[in-house]
Image: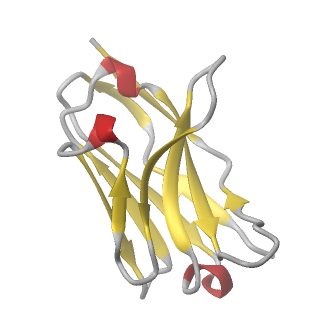
Amino acid sequence: QVQLVESGGGLVQAGGSLRLSCAASRSIFRISAMGWYRQVPGKQRELVATITSGGFRNFADSVKGRFTISRDNTKNTVYLQMNSLKPEDTAVYYCNADPQVASGYVYWGQGTQVTVSS
């Protein structure tokens, strides 16, 4: 069974930092592009950052220069380092694994709340 287990969310003041972690089942991690998405109530889930199995990174314009994404293939874990946080970064953050199979099926974590106070 594929699992994505997120951790690291919480409450932080504006300008602060948080690091999110997502531990994935080994069977899926090694073949997947991994990513972080976020969602606020009443809005669609949006991409924050992705990293391919080869290490290619992509970021939403709103987080460029503030967030970084990395993956540790020995721990089957992807990280999202969030610096210079803003109140508008407040959301539930979801880990995503995309094994890029023909069906297009992707996997999601349960989500972790990030709250940035002003």
Identify which residue, 21 or 53, lies in the foreground: 53
Quadrant of the image containing the N terminus: bottom right
Identify which residue, 23 or 100, lies in the foreground: 100
Q: Is residue 40 above or below residue 77?
A: above
Q: Quadrant of residue 31?
A: bottom right
The residue lying at 73 percent from left, 78 percent from top is 101
Please identify the residue farthest to the top as the structure is shown: 118
Left or right: where 29 falls relative to 68: right
Residue 98 position within the rendered picture, expressed as x and y whole percent measured from the top left? 63, 69
Q: Is residue 18 above or below residue 56?
A: above
Residue 47 position within the rendered picture, expressed as x and y whole percent measured from the top left? 50, 45
Please identify the residue farthest to the front as the structure is shown: 102
The residue lying at 27 percent from left, 24 percent from top is 86
The residue lying at 42 percent from left, 88 percent from top is 74
Quadrant of the image containing the C terminus: top left
Left or right: where 34 falls relative to 99: left
Q: Quadrant of residue 96?
A: bottom right
Identify which residue, 24 or 39, lies in the foreground: 39
Residue 24 position within the rendered picture, expressed as x and y whole percent measured from the top left? 59, 72
Residue 113 position within the rendered picture, expressed as x and y whole percent measured from the top left? 52, 34
Left or right: where 35 falls relative to 110: left
Q: Is residue 19 above or below residue 93?
A: below
Identify which residue, 24 or 47, lies in the foreground: 47
